[in-house]
Image: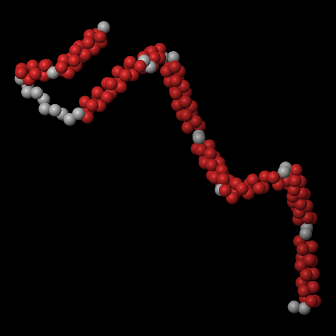
Amino acid sequence: MSETSIQSEVERVIEGAADALSDDIVARLGSTMGEGLILLDQVSHSNLDQAIPVINDLVTSGDLERGANLLRVLGAAGDALGDDIVGRLGGVLNELLCLADRLANNENLNRLLDFLEQDDVIETLETLCKATSEVRNAQPSTPPPATIMGLVNTMKDPEMQQSLQMLSRFASAFRR
């Protein structure tokens, strides 16, 4: 291309640009430039230059993306919480508070808790649990013959006698 043809092409581009610049376009361009200058002024006064390295570190470590994902989850949870669900959650919370109030003001429960704090009661309950576990895990033994002599032999066993005495004492104390 010759120098004259390049010059004529440039002149035509300039003429086309001048034709395209209507008053409306010039007003919009001026408005955009003005808003850009206002934004630039706000950035210079807001110390954004100090925040950019922090934002860069967040992007590099992936924390910014995780934070954005967490915000999306919270937003979805907020969207999912309709009036019905909020009402039901409020009802459940109200019932829990009523239950907590009843438990806190229940004299029998307080007495039971005081009773369970006694060392001898704890030891008795632990012994009872161990004995129950031993009975449950014990291998079944052959029962004595179902005769009068089998009953007499069983009654001669000292452990059986102690157990029957303890059961008798428990029954009479329980009746009182």
Picture quadrant of residue 164: top left
Where's residue 94, x and y in %?
Answer: 55, 27
Whether residue 147 is situated above or below residue 36 in the rendered picture = above
| Mark count | 0
Residue 101 shown left or right of residue 152 in the figure:
right
For this orientation, the residue located farthest to the top is 176
For this orientation, the residue located farthest to the bottom is 2
Q: Residue at x 65, y 56 (%)?
A: 62
Name the quarter where the C terminus is drawn. top left
Tell me if I can see residue 35 in this picture. no
Residue 6 shown left or right of residue 74 in the figure:
right
Q: 115 or 80, which is in the foreground?
A: 115
Q: Which residue is drawn at 89% across and 79% down?
A: 13
Where's residue 173, x and y in %?
Answer: 29, 10
Where's residue 156, x and y in %?
Answer: 13, 19
Q: 41 or 62, which is in the foreground?
A: 62
Tell me if I can see residue 125 in this picture. yes
Q: Residue at x 15, y 21 (%)?
A: 157
Q: How is the image coloured?
A: secondary structure
Name the quarter where the N terminus is drawn. bottom right
Whether residue 82 is situated above or below residue 30 in the rendered picture = above
Q: 26 or 111, which is in the foreground?
A: 111
Where's residue 101, x and y in %?
Answer: 53, 21
Q: Which residue is drawn at 38% across and 18% down?
A: 120
Residue 16 shown left or right of residue 107 in the figure:
right
Picture quadrant of residue 136: top left
For this orientation, the residue located farthest to the front is 158
